[in-house]
Amino acid sequence: MKRNLIRRVSLWGSNRRMRRVAVLLWIGMLGFDPWVVSRLARSYAHLAMLPELLLPTLTQLGITWLAFRGMRIGLAQPTLEDSAVMQYGSDFESLTDKQCDDLYERRFRDFILGRVGKDERENELRLQSEGDAYRLLRPGLAIAIATYWAVCLLGPFAAIREALAITAIVFTWLAVAVLVLPTMVRMWTQPNEVGEMRIVGPGKVA
């Protein structure tokens, strides 16, 4: 019975549908949190003295850090079968009840403490997901900056239009930095190709 429970818990954590539910819960929490925090801040005088958006921003950053820390650790954890082989040299079904308990406790402890070893497969999946996320970020960032410029230039903000334009310029250059940074890193770090000529000393080429 306990063996089946451990397997169900492990499969629940590695199920794609449940991972998507966790992402949707995080998004919903980010939408619900400012309302709760704003009501809480109005109930306490020392919190009401803070800038209006400061406390919700801090709580949302905290929620995001905790959520994504848990998600990244969960994605990096080995499967139940791999954990059994690595820890006991046997498949999960061949373990004793005590070994199953120890295995589950160790996996839970590693999840809480973030002690998960990353293998080549995990590194490859992480790099692939980061590349996919960046490809989604590029057009989204460009659209956001263009929209912000349109609001700054065409909106009814004549009194503060100059200040808005300054912030638009700053955000534009931040966006440019994000968009060109991968190319800059590659140009800085990519080694010479095999057989490429290089200068080894004054007047000498290898």
Image: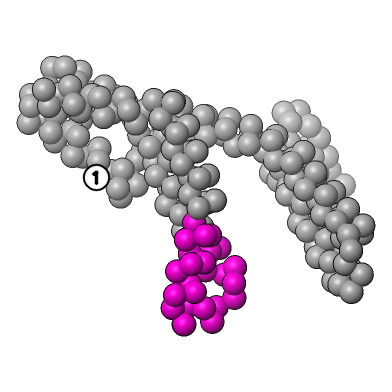
Q: Residues within 10 Å of mark 1 (few under 14, many from 20)?
A: few
Residue drawn at point x = 55 percent, y = 63 percent = 57
| Residue bearing the label numbered 1 | 109
Residue 76: x and y in percent read 40, 35
**Going by the image, does 41 lie left or right of 173?**
left
Amino acid type at circle 1 is Arg
Q: Position of residue 86 (x, y in %)?
A: 24, 28
Horizontal side of 117 relative to 34 (left or right) equals left
Instruction: Residue at 15%, 24% (x, y): give it.
Output: 3
When the figure is inspected, residue 39 is found, relative to residue 115, above or below; the finding is below
Could you tell me residue 203's position as x and y percent? 87, 47
Residue drawn where x is 34% and y is 47% of the image: 114
11 to 192, vertically: above or below = above
For the C terminus, the quadrant is top right
> Is 28 situated left or right of 152 in this image?
left
Residue stretch rendered in magenta on the structure: 33-59
